[in-house]
Amino acid sequence: MIDQSPTQESTDPNSEGQHYVLQLFVTGISLNSVRAIANIKQICEQYLPGKYSLEIIDVHQQKMLAEREQLIALPLLIKRSPLPERRLIGDLSDTKKVLSGLGITN
């Protein structure tokens, strides 16, 4: 399952001029995967509207990509850009922790 979420323009001063490139690795439709997808979409729409691209990758369907990334736990969110690259593990339900991991101050 790959989902390229649409984006909208934003006037959020915390993300001004920065576009966030995110990849979320999940395992099918497991409960944690479904939660992680819902949580990251909500966080992105609230804090990064128009300033992000989100790719959702099911490791069962994209085994080679998962192996290349050397995944140790799932769900796993990788922030590719802006640098530095960061990795967050879990269902992404702790919004403050996710925002901190993404380098976003609210």
Image (spheres, helix red, strand yellow):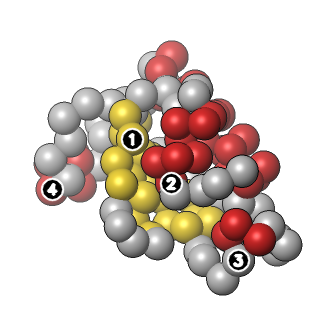
Question: Residue 63 appears at what percent x and percent y?
Answer: 21, 45
Q: Marks 1 and 3: which is nearer the front?
A: 3
**Residue that numbered label 2 is attached to:** 102
User: Cα distance, mark 3 to mark 4?
Assistant: 32 Å
- The residue carrying mark 1 is 88
- Vertical placement of 76 versus 66: above or below? above
Mark nearest the camera among 3 and 4 is 3
**Residue at x 39%, y 71% (from the top left corner):** 83
Indicate which disc residue 68 carries: 4
Judge left or right: residue 70 versus residue 91: left
Q: Secondary structure at mark 1?
A: strand
Q: Position of residue 15 (x, y in %)?
A: 67, 69
Name which of mark 4 and mark 1 comes first in the sequence: 4
Q: Is residue 21 visible?
A: yes
Residue nearest the observer in this picture, 95 or 41: 95
Label 2 is placed on what type of residue?
Leu
Amino acid at dot 1: Leu
Please tell me whether mark 3 sits on a helix, a strand or a loop: loop
Instruction: Return the mark for residue 16.
Output: 3
Judged by depth in the image, the label closer to the viewer, 4 or 1, is 1
Write down the quadrant of residue 50 in the picture: bottom right
